Amino acid sequence: MTAEATQTAPVDRRRILTAVAGLGATQIIGWGTTFSSLTIFGTRIGDDLALSREAVFGGITIMLLASALVAPRVGRFADQRGARPVMITGSLLAAMAMIALAFTQGATTYLLAWVLVGLAMPMMLANTALVGLVQIVGSNARQAITGLMLLSGLTGTVFLPLNALLIESIGWRNAYLGFALLHLLVCVPIHALILTRRAPEAPHAPRSSSDRAVDGILPPDKRFMAFVMLTVWSCAEGLIVWGLYMQIIDVFKGMGLSAVAAVGVWAAVGPAQASARFGELMLGGRYSILTTALLSAGLSCSSFFLILPFGGSIVTAAAFAICLGLGHGFYAIARNTLPLTLFGVREYGTYLGRMMLPQSIVNAIAPIVFATMIARFDPTSALWLAGAAALAGFASVVMLVRTCRT
């Protein structure tokens, strides 16, 4: 079957729902057992291994840097050979990493285990899962991507209380052994059964209007500039999420809010993100994904204008949190759908992998940069830095829209 036939033939709705549900489950497990685990386990790991807080959470930096090195190759391989073997390999490697974490005895083995996690990340998590979903659904995958983003957003809801229960009942070492079993007995079978055995074949006929879904809407001479603008926006959002989000409670407290008020206000971010994704799920397809990108970047940028000129109060902080949460909710959908629209099914994984390289580097250094800003200057300086990043992201999206429309 040609790629054109593959993309235009109707896909069984039950198969789409099964793919979204199955990949959603493996994404929750993937994020919950890796990144989210340190939220609960971090202090206990530091005490047991005699490691500083910086060394414990330095595992996240190591993870991101390792994933950045392999992400472009992983994306290209998933395009050429299919996401199925990549995600199965990633789950097996993640299981090995969980076992390594369970038996770690010091700083060296601990950080080496996070290298394994970083190598597994691009194989089993977001980018390759999206490629696998697109290879099942085809080019009209916008709502399926939104559904997957909605499910993966439940990671904290599932794993934060679960990890809190596990560390008190069986300890973090046994918890990581249990996580290894989840990757082996749940994720590997799901990836093997749900994903297609091979990537869709490329068309041999000359490009026509029906091939636009396969090749993307942009001609070759527009692709580089569009990719740069999309990457700038991704890096700007990554700087905000991985830098500001992780330290926002201290920022709010430094602006005069109590600890209880700061936590309560920031709790609005999760529902705001979910509301944006649910709205996109209900209304997506009625307007261009470029409109979603503009809305996302505009909301993120506007959120800083709601708090910086007026200072920190419960009202301004709440407005900031809700607006920023809505913006990031739309961002997760636009960032993962735009490469499909602009560059097509055939190179979807390749472009996602290329984007992940600079974004992972930015994500890795963001916590250090923001911590330094807060320590050496004041908490408001972190908001100014994040606001500048949001403004740069908005400008890049405006340029991207102009590039696509011309």
Image: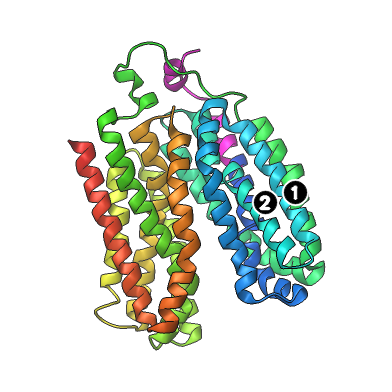
For label 2, the crowd category at 10 Å Cα-Cα, with few meaning under 14, some 14 to 19 and many 20 or more, is: many
- At 43% across and 51% down in the image, what residue appears? 358
- At 30% across and 83% down in the image, what residue appears? 311
- At 22% across and 50% down in the image, what residue appears? 398
Q: Is any atom of residue 268 visible in this view?
A: no
Which sits in the foreground, 46 or 8?
A: 46
Image quadrant where residue 90 sits? top right
For label 1, the residue is: 96
Task: State yes or no: residue 5 in magenta.
Answer: yes
**Residue 117 drawn at (x, y percent):** 65, 52
Q: Is any atom of residue 32 visible in this view?
A: yes
Under mark 1, the amino acid is Met
Where 132 sits versus 126, above or below? above
Tell me if 320 is positioned left or right of 149 in this view: left
Under mark 2, the amino acid is Leu
Residue 33's tag is none
Quadrant including the C terminus: top left
- At 47% across and 81% down in the image, what residue appears? 250
Q: Which residues are magenta?
A: 1-21
